[in-house]
Image: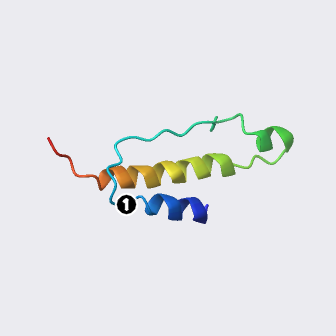
């Protein structure tokens, strides 16, 4: 996760106007299906990446 955060933070200054996170299906995590201990690592990682993208978009000035 630290690597992707560095990459995303390196995009600061660009006009980020949209983002898409795919292949994060709540309740269908392979690790959850294979173990009796539900591990939410996929969902947490997806949420963290989404948060970083929202932060980048919030820094983009709105110009008419």
Percent from the top left, x then y, of residue 36? 84, 44
- Name which quarter of the figure residue 18 lies in: top left
Q: Determine the secondary structure under disc 1.
A: loop
Q: How is the image coloured?
A: rainbow
Question: Who's the residue at 34% across and 43% down the image?
Answer: 17
Of the pair 36 and 30, the residue shown nearer to us: 30
- Side of 30 relative to 51 (left or right): right
Question: Who's the residue at 54% across and 40% down the image?
Answer: 21
- Numbered label tally: 1
6 w.r.t. 60: above or below: below
- Side of 23 relative to 9 (left or right): right
Percent from the top left, x then y, of residue 55? 38, 55
Quarter of the image that includes the C terminus: top left
Decide: few, some or many residues near mark 1? Use Cα within 10 Å; few <14, some 14-19, many ≥20: some
Question: Who's the residue at 37% across and 60% down the image?
Answer: 12
Percent from the top left, x then y, of residue 3? 59, 64
Question: Who's the residue at 37% across and 54% down the image?
Answer: 56
The outermost residue toward the left is: 64
- Name which quarter of the figure residue 1 lies in: bottom right
Of the pair 48 and 20, the residue shown nearer to us: 20
Query: To which residue does mark 1 refer?
Result: 12
Of the pair 49 and 44, the residue shown nearer to us: 49
7 w.r.t. 49: above or below: below
Percent from the top left, x then y, of residue 2? 59, 65
- Name which quarter of the figure residue 31 lies in: top right
């Amino acid at each position: 996760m630290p690597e992707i955060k560095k990459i995303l933070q390196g995009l600061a200054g660009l006009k980020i106007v949209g983002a898409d996170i795919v292949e994060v299906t709540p309740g269908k995590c392979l690790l959850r299906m294979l173990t009796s201990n539900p591990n939410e690592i996929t969902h947490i990682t997806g949420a963290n990446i989404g948060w970083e993208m929202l932060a980048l978009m919030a820094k983009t000035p709105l110009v008419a």
